[in-house]
Image (cartoon, helix red, strand yellow):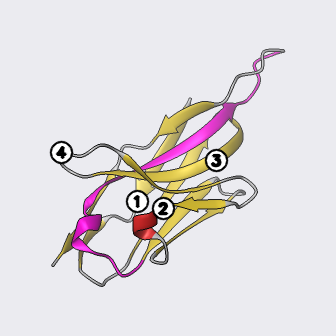
Amino acid sequence: QVQLVESGGGLVQAGGSLRLSCAASGRLFNINAMGWYRQAPGKQRELVAAITSGGSTNYADSVKGRFTISRDNVKNTVYLQMNSLKPEDTAVYYCNAEAILRPSGSYLYPPYDYWGQGTQVTVSS
């Protein structure tokens, strides 16, 4: 129904930068919040940053001042600019979107969480 396609991951040295992108497509009616989560080996998935449709943002304490989340509501795309990367930022990064599908007749779909397939970010020391 909704597809999230991520790009921009890769290998970078400590102190370097990467920019992740995530484009949403499908039977979209509206997208509420969009965000980025990450999961390192042996750890739980955690919120990195989130942004509402109005542009309000929220960051994990560990990335404040280094990462910036933004979105293009026309393109249904969310970005994560990651600067001053550290080895502890190494993880699989997942895009998330709370989206509402286009109505089917008179049926109004409730918001639902969609996830991307994940993109690997590796920061070498």
* Disc number lying in front (3 or 2): 3
Residue 33 disc label: 3
The magenta region covers: 83-105
Compute the Cα span from label 1 to label 3.
Answer: 19 Å
Residue 89 vs residue 51: left or right?
A: left
Q: Indicate the secondary structure of the residue bearing disc 4.
A: loop
Residue 42 disc label: 4
Q: Amino acid at mark 2?
A: Ser
Q: Earlier in the sequence, mark 3 or mark 2?
A: 2
The residue sitting at 36% across, 43% down in the picture is 117
Answer above or below: position of 5 versus 28: below
Q: Amino acid at mark 4?
A: Gly
Contact check, label 2 and label 1, Cβ < 8 Å: yes
Q: Indicate the secondary structure of the residue bearing disc 2.
A: strand
Q: Earlier in the sequence, mark 1 or mark 4?
A: 1
Q: Amino acid at mark 3?
A: Ala
Compute the Cα span from label 1 to label 4.
Answer: 23 Å
